[in-house]
Image: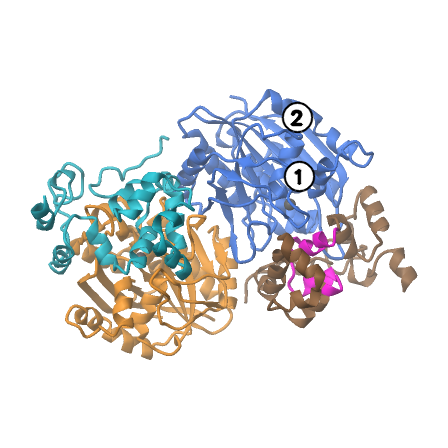
Chain colours: A orange, B blue, C brown, D cyan
Amino acid sequence: MARITASVYTSHIPAVGVAMDLGKTQEPYWQPVFEGYEYSKEWLKENKPDVVFLVYNDHGTAFSLEMIPTFALGTGAEYPPADEGWGPRPVPMVHGHPELSAHIAQSVIQDDFDLTLINEMPVDHGLTVPLSVMCGQPEAWPFKVIPFHVNVVQYPVPSGKRCFELGQAIRRAVESFDEDLNVQIWGTGGMSHQLQGARAGLINREWDNAFLDRLIADPADLSNMPHIDYVREAGSEGVELVMWLIARGAMADVNGGAAPTVKHRFYHVPASNTAVGHLILENNI
Amino acid sequence: MARITASVYTSHIPAVGVAMDLGKTQEPYWQPVFEGYEYSKEWLKENKPDVVFLVYNDHGTAFSLEMIPTFALGTGAEYPPADEGWGPRPVPMVHGHPELSAHIAQSVIQDDFDLTLINEMPVDHGLTVPLSVMCGQPEAWPFKVIPFHVNVVQYPVPSGKRCFELGQAIRRAVESFDEDLNVQIWGTGGMSHQLQGARAGLINREWDNAFLDRLIADPADLSNMPHIDYVREAGSEGVELVMWLIARGAMADVNGGAAPTVKHRFYHVPASNTAVGHLILENNI
Amino acid sequence: MSLNKPYKDIPGTTIFDAEESRKGYWLNQFCSSLMKAENRTRFKADERAYLNEWKMTEAQKDAVISRDLNECIRLGGNIYFLARIGATDGLTFQQMAGSMTGMSEEEYRNMMVGGGRSPEGNRYLGEDGDAQPHRQPQGNHNKEEA
Amino acid sequence: MSLNKPYKDIPGTTIFDAEESRKGYWLNQFCSSLMKAENRTRFKADERAYLNEWKMTEAQKDAVISRDLNECIRLGGNIYFLARIGATDGLTFQQMAGSMTGMSEEEYRNMMVGGGRSPEGNRYLGEDGDAQPHRQPQGNHNKEEA
Ligand SMILES: [Fe+3]
Ligand SMILES: [Fe+3]
């Protein structure tokens, strides 16, 4: 039987990907950022999943305004890195797990989540930067990836509560898959940042750390926070953090299991416009 | 304030559109089909809506397997008739109502329906045939149309219950729109038909009529019927009938109002492979 | 996979689920391409050459060329996509649906005019309706040929 | 429309909702086209000519040409789409974001290294934080120029 063994949370800042692609990780500006992922890379090697269910948002790359899905599940076999305007990132092709994806689609749609299924799309920094910070620069990604896109670009975006409940439905889906698979779920985006207007550059260190505390200790309560609080406190793009609730909702304790172990927690300001947040939670079975 | 004044239900059989386009409506085969819509055309002239919220399924036309949305709301300004392989139907451009669409999107997504928003797409016979049978062959459609697509092509498709609840959310959305608009909601597709395999041509007159009875009298109960019953009893394509539950869910009585008046009911076999069903329900305010 | 698929016990009926969809992906994508007039022209000019542009299996290509829609469905095709082939050939939906039953066009049309195929005996595999496997192919048309 | 839009009271912040999206549809679609290298080349060769291929307003075209991202946002642009213009110019996200604050690149970068913009006074319109309208444009850079 497939099992969700751990969840990983991380910002997916494009400049972090660029710093890796250009070999700048040891520069004084970037060194403290990447130091925060040293433990994580070791941990991931020792806890190598078969599949990562990777929750992210496409940033107007695969999805233009022609068609805006609220939740989109990748059911394809492979996903090429996107050209976001600077040319595609020099990172490996992302390989999917169509059988598990199809199974999750079947289960989650029957649980009344109105997914859009995607068989072909390029994946942008929202998906590839988390892979880079967690895996470094391998020739090929060491596991399969199921991309799951959440609309946080055009309002209304799905509520924190909806996201948290979706995580629970994903857990049910994964755990009813017959094959023995080690599955991790990653929630990406955030933490506080605003990329637009006179308020660009907003960072709220106190709020971010309270978010991490609550995500660990009481995610059900955290999931009731309205969008406006994210925007007001953590910047217009801080609303990406609702995606972390999907990953958190898929953990065992939400469904009556044991509380997860916090394996790693990291916070740093700044990377480009953004506060970097990162967390690893392991299920205890 | 915008109001849903009536709901219309009709099959959307492509051959019916072809019969109209080729001027065959008075042929003996077709005459009884179109006679069933004579009353409806008069009724529609006397009860002309400003906007029709038209629930249908795209038949692999606008949406290939590349991307399969469960629920897709048209938010664009216009939608051209599609080329489904025989060339586009000679019918007018469909004009949308972007303001009302945007309002419905806002409201319904906040009600936890995970819509996909569509700004540009061609519309196939699922949408244009209902317009043709209800309006005849005008130079321009006499009202705005908001297309709403439901995936009934690739399983799993949304449950009857989910559709019925969606109808209720659409009603709340429409009735919170400030502008004074007469809105009708149409549910299309069905009734019994199967287009594939050794069982092609299946028609279940008794079941279809029981469906109409229950749709009128107790739609909440009807909405609990599982897909497998639709398929087994009404043919593999009979599952399109779940879309009628969206329109029915938007009627006043579902939300504690008065029961609707049955203005018209029509049933005929066959049109091509399919049983033709048609119903007009008017809200009593 | 342990999810419930209660739709495997209906005779002569394939439910197009995610598994079928994966199997038939390129077959159905090829069909979708026929919504463009220029592609219909290119396909008609040289069917095999056009099919070779797609990542389809040889069995899928053969089923398309022989217009065997039942076989296309077995190989992951969905009728709404497959209908693009019929449209390219100038067929109606009734002709396409009829072609899967073993009946002649006239037999199928008469069945529909007579009220369509009865659900009796055709709800579950193992009953004795006319769509059951042991009663295939249907139609005098076919029997005469056989 | 009577739906609640509680996000209109935050200074220096535009929430990209369906209304903004309608307003900025072609502006954002133009931006999306710059994800293709050949379109970036064509745009750079003759900006006005390339913009004229899109159903944009003249005000939108002018805002693009003058690289006024704040004005682009007022006209319905969304930052993720607008970023394609910056990418075409070879700018980073930090340079783009900074350009909307009135600060020089160095001032903005220093603000970020110093912990970023404080939320204090910047949560509601009418407070006295540095992102409030009455404190624009920001930065010594601008003041020196003015
Ligand atoms: Fe992001
Ligand atoms: Fe249909």
Sequence-first disc among 1 and 2:
1
- Separation of residues labelled 1 and 2 (CA atoms): 15 Å
Q: Under tag 2, what secondary structure?
A: helix
Give me the chain letter of mark 2: B
Residue A235 sits inside the magenta stretch:
no
Any atom of ligand 2 within 8 Å of the CB at mark 2?
Answer: no
Residue that numbered label 1 is attached to: B11
Ligand 1: give its quadrant. Answer: bottom left
**Residue A213 in which image quadrant:** bottom left
Q: Which mark is residue A147?
A: none
- Answer whether residue C144 is visible to the viewer in this image: yes
What's the residue at 66%, 42% (across, down)? B190
Residue C67 sits inside the magenta stretch:
yes
Identify which amino acid the numbered label 2 is placed on. Lys
What's the residue at 17%, 53% (across, down)? A204
Give the image location of residue B85, x and y in percent.
66, 50
Give the image location of residue D138, x and y in percent.
12, 46
Q: Which mark is residue B41?
A: 2
Give me the chain letter of mark 1: B
Q: Residues within 10 Å of mark 1 (few under 14, many from 20)?
A: many
